[in-house]
Image (tube, coloured by chain):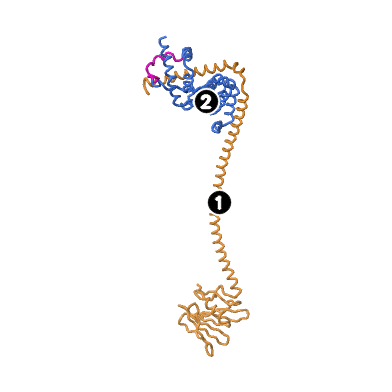
Chain colours: A blue, B orange
Amino acid sequence: MLAFLMVIEDQQTRHKLETIYLTYHREMYAIAYGILNHVQDAQDVVQSSIIKMAKYIDAFSDPHCNKTRALFVTIIRNTAINIYRHKKNHPATPIDHLAEDFEDEHDSVEQYVIRIGDVAWLKEKMAALKVEYAEILALKYSYDFTDSEIAELLSIEPGNMRIRLHRAKAALRKLVGEGRDV
Amino acid sequence: MSGKHGGFDQMLNSFYRQIGDQYVTDTAESIEKMREAAQEIEYPKELDDWFKAYMKQLVRAERKQQSQLYWKKQSRRLALVFLLVLLGCSIVTFGVEANRNKFFDFVTEVTEKYTTFDFDQEEQKQGNVIDGPHGWSYYFMPTYLPEGYVLGDSKVEGSIRVMRFLNKQKQALDFTQAPIGADLVIDTENAQIEEVNINDQLGSYVIYKKKVSILWKNESTVFVIHGYLPLSEMIKVAESTQFHK
């Protein structure tokens, strides 16, 4: 616990964490409870997520911005899912069929060029993309977290994190490929 | 990665970022949408209590960290002060040691001067001669004189030099010196004549009617002293003879 406490270095940072909690504590709890449907487990999720947020408090630039909201939701959701999986004895990430996920990323350049910047098209693809893939892409490319940081934030092993990221990219490519002929 | 693939990777990353950004926007919107529903959920008081306790822990940890930083800074300052004090002490010690040496030298010097001075005073009290006869040079004279004797007179006859020391009772103590070969005569009729050793040189003393005469020589000079003093005192005067320029 002390190690987590030590990451808060000053009053301003502590105030930021307090603001996030006071603003979103109900949403945090609601997300956790929505997944676990268990009061005590949901409380544990909120607590461990708060401690995790304290560790990465610098990533929360403004307590009220979209990035902060998305980040705490991601942390809460993944922490809750992790507990849920442990309780249900579910493997965190299936690692079978791993080889078939390794496809050539450089096989269809043109199909990406024409669509980048098309928000409507992105929204359409996002809707079809699994949340866990979208969030890992966000953590990697929007928040610029390192692989080990993403693994910790998502409560998964670093190896599984890399698999999930690869799958996210593959799934996205597949979705884009499907849309090429549309 | 370069060329076509390099540019493609950049484009892909940009694409992934757009997907990520879209996820951020969508998630933030979903939070806004669930706000009302979240307010209706019964929120456990234990979580608020836990958070308050956690914030207190953070404050304590922050204070502890500040305290540690403070003491670390203070320790550094103390160490610096200690180092400076140590350095100062060393300088002072060496300085004092040096000064002490100087002081001792000085004291020694002063003491020597004082000793000399004191000795001189003492010798003066005892009638000892400090300065030889006026105008004399390259001569011998006793550095010890019995109490009360001072230089009263002096004379030079050819190569023979005579100093007369007198006390208050005007008793004379004559000190004669002459180059080896000079004729010096001592009346020894009915006198007691004995050998005496003066500064490792064989000499003779003659006692005649309470008058004591000692005769001895060194490499260049013959000495004779006459006086009405005990033999021991006369020997002491003889032995104190030193050369003066």
The residue that mark 2 highlights is A59
Residue type marked 1 = Cys
Assess disc 1: are there few (<14), some (14-19) or many (≥20) residues with their C-alpha within 10 Å of its C-alpha: few
In this rendered view, identify the residue nearer to me: A24 or B127.
Answer: A24
Residue A142 position, x and y percent, is 48, 21
Residue A91 position, x and y percent, is 47, 23
State the image quarter where residue A105 is shown.
top left
Residue A171 visible to the viewer: yes
Task: Specify the subunit that label 1 lies on.
Answer: B
Say if A149 sits above or below B118 in the image. Answer: above
The answer to the question of whether label 2 and label 1 lie on touching residues, with beta carbons closer than 8 A, is: no
Closer to the observer: label 2 or label 1? 2
Q: Secondary structure at mark 2?
A: helix
The residue that mark 1 highlights is B89
Say if A93 sits above or below B67 in the image. Answer: above
Chain part drawn in magenta = A100-117
Residue at 55%, 28% in the rendered image = A51
Outermost residue, top side? A182
Residue at 59%, 16% in the rendered image = B37
